[in-house]
Image (cartoon, rainbow, N blue to C red):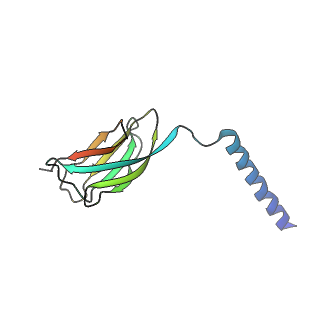
Amino acid sequence: MKWLRNILKGASLTTALFIFQACYGTPQWLHDSEVQLQVVAQDGSPVDDVEVYTRFADNEDLDWNLCGNTDAAGNLSTVIYYDENNDPQFRVSDPAGRYAVRDTVVADLNGTIVITLSKTE
């Protein structure tokens, strides 16, 4: 009899969660987009193995989310999630310390986004 009670508890919980999702759905305001980034130095040469982060530009309270590291050609292809009312902000950081940290807001996600870094002093 105890097993029947456990089955009914599980079925009730599953039903409640299903009804919640049916009523409220999944968030429709969040979009995803595949983004092509290229990180270059001021002289135009590609910068490899730098970390690229993203977050919403107007929300300073959010933590930065790591998208990945650039390859030998300075390229990174990643999928980001963004709000249609807020442009994504990118941060490029070099763990080796060769280049200064760069923050930039990108309004147009079409094509390859080129981010130029300056050397640290």
- Which residue reaches farthest right? 1
Q: Depth check: give the residue in front, 19 or 5.
A: 19
The image position of residue 92, as x and y in percent, is 28, 49
Taking 71 as reference, is 45 left or right? left
Would you identify the image quadrant in which residue 82 lies? top left
Residue 87, compared with residue 4, is above or below; it is above
Would you identify the image quadrant in which residue 5 lies? bottom right
The image position of residue 19, as x and y in percent, is 73, 45
Residue shown at 15% from the left, 50% from the top: 119
- Which residue reaches farthest top? 85
Taking 12 as reference, is 84 left or right? left
Residue shown at 17% from the left, 49% from the top: 44
Q: How many marks?
A: 0
The image position of residue 108, as x and y in percent, is 36, 37
- Which residue reaches farthest left? 121
Taking 3 as reference, is 81 left or right? left
Quarter of the image for the N terminus: give it: bottom right
Residue shown at 29% from the left, 60% from the top: 71
Residue 7, compared with residue 12, is above or below; it is below
Q: Depth check: give the residue in front, 71 or 65.
A: 71
